[in-house]
Amino acid sequence: MIIDPEELVWEGYESRMLSANSIEGLLHFQIRQQEEGVQLLYEITSRQPLSRLLEGRKIQAKEIHSLVSGVLKVLERMEGYLLGENHILLEPEYLYVEPESLQVWLCLVPGLEQDFPEKFGKFLEYLLECVDHGDKESVILAYGL
């Protein structure tokens, strides 16, 4: 996956921290300098974007729990490296998962500044849209979140 950071301040602490460390749950990236600017190349091998994985199917309570707790675990690991959650792209097309285990991999973009609580709320709304409304436990969990 390639992201063009355009006007983002990508040269900084986050870039150095991510290039020097492999943090479980964060997609590893390389910086590629080009005449047009800089590109961030993310390693997504064997992972699928959540949006593609949930295309045309409904999710159950177990999967909702796995996805939400996976995001929270990655955020906890990030704290140990002093990385902020406001740099995370939490849209379903940038949240990658292992198809079999549903292990979550987040895309951190150095220099990006977003309102994480707002983005997390939109992520939960997305999960609510994908929930199996015929399964009472799934609906209660999704609305509770």
Image (tube, rainbow, N blue to C red):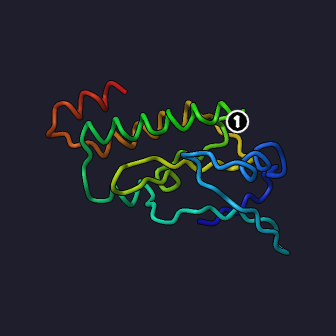
Q: Relative to 60, is 144 above or below?
A: above
Q: Residues within 10 Å of mark 1 (few under 14, many from 20)?
A: few
| Amino acid type, callout 1 | Tyr
Left or right, 57 with respect to 112, comes to left
Q: Position of residue 11 (x, y in %)?
A: 84, 51
Residue plotted at (45% across, 58% down): 49
Residue furthest to the front: 21
Residue corresponding to mark 1: 81
SS for callout 1: loop
Residue furthest to the top: 144
Left or right, 128 with respect to 3, comes to left
Residue plotted at (63% across, 56% down): 28
Question: Which of the 4 quarters of the picture holds residue 31?
Answer: bottom right
Residue plotted at (50% across, 51% down): 95
Numbered marks: total: 1
Assign the C terminus to one quadrant of the image: top left
Residue plotted at (53% across, 62% down): 44
Q: Position of residue 85 (x, y in %)?
A: 63, 36
Assign the N terminus to one quadrant of the image: bottom right
Left or right, 12 with respect to 95, comes to right
- 127 or 1: nearer the viewer: 1
- 56 or 53: nearer the viewer: 53
Left or right, 57 with respect to 26, comes to left
Q: Position of residue 98 (x, y in %)?
A: 41, 55
Q: Position of residue 72 (x, y in %)?
A: 50, 33
Residue furthest to the bottom: 35
